[in-house]
Image (spheres, rainbow, N blue to C red):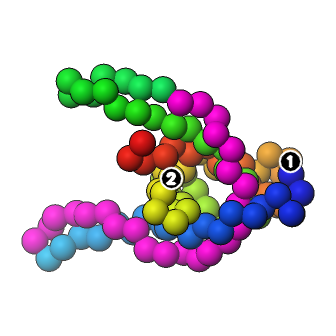
């Protein structure tokens, strides 16, 4: 993957856990920065969920290395949202991250 291949503008969203005064817990996402990525479709499928067909699209997403990005984060490309399932530094050189992601709402 070359730097010129990272040509899709993305926004990274970090999960934030909050506990209310009454003890209720909630998760929200806050912007953790913008970057450029390369996104490639890995596979598509469908499954029966609660009596209806649900589509699933998995992608491989390459980013410049960031030490804070972890699985559970989200990534937005325009109106599309991807949930990061796994994040890895493939060659341990701190140059890039390869993320397995699932597109939400497909």
Question: For residue 6, what is the image quadrant?
Answer: bottom right
Question: For residue 68, what is the image quadrant?
Answer: bottom right
Q: From this view, report whether residue 47 is shown above or below residue 86.
A: above
Which residue position is annotated with label 1?
A: 91
Task: Determine whether, in the image, residue 66 is placed left or right of residue 51.
Answer: right
Label 1 crowding class (10 Å Cα cut-off): few <14, some 14-19, many 20+?
A: few
Q: From this view, report whether residue 104 is shown above or below residue 54.
A: below
The answer to if 19 sits in the magenta stretch is: no
Report the span colored magenta. 22-44
Label 2 crowding class (10 Å Cα cut-off): few <14, some 14-19, many 20+?
A: many
Q: Is residue 93 visible?
A: no
Q: From this view, report whether residue 60 is shown above or below residue 4.
A: above
Q: Position of residue 12 (x, y in %)?
A: 56, 67
For the point 30% across and 22% down, the residue is: 48
Q: Position of residue 9 (x, y in %)?
A: 65, 68
- Kindly report the distance in space between the C-alpha atoms of the residues bearing marks 1 and 2: 24 Å
Task: Determine whether, in the image, residue 10 is placed left or right of residue 50.
Answer: right
Q: Position of residue 16 (x, y in %)?
A: 39, 68
Q: Assess whether mark 2 and mark 1 are in contact (beta carbons under 8 angstroms).
A: no
Q: From this view, report whether residue 85 is shown above or below residue 29.
A: above
For the point 68% across and 51% down, the residue is: 39
Which residue position is annotated with label 2?
A: 82
Question: For residue 47, what is the image quadrant?
Answer: top left
Instruction: Identify which residue, 106 or 19, lies in the foreground.
Output: 106
Q: Position of residue 93 (x, y in %)?
A: 87, 56
Task: Point out the tag, 1 or 2, that comes first from the N-terminus.
Answer: 2
């Amino acid at each position: 993957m070359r730097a010129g291949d990272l040509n899709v503008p993305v926004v990274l969203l970090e999960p934030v856990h909050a506990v209310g005064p009454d003890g209720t817990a909630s998760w929200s996402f806050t912007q953790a920065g913008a970057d450029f990525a390369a996104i490639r479709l890995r596979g598509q499928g469908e499954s029966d969920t609660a009596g209806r067909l649900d589509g699933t699209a998995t992608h491989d997403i390459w980013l410049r290395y960031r030490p804070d990005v972890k699985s559970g984060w989200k990534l937005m490309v325009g109106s599309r949202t991807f949930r990061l399932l796994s994040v890895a530094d493939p060659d341990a050189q701190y140059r890039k991250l390869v993320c397995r992601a699932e597109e939400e709402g497909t």
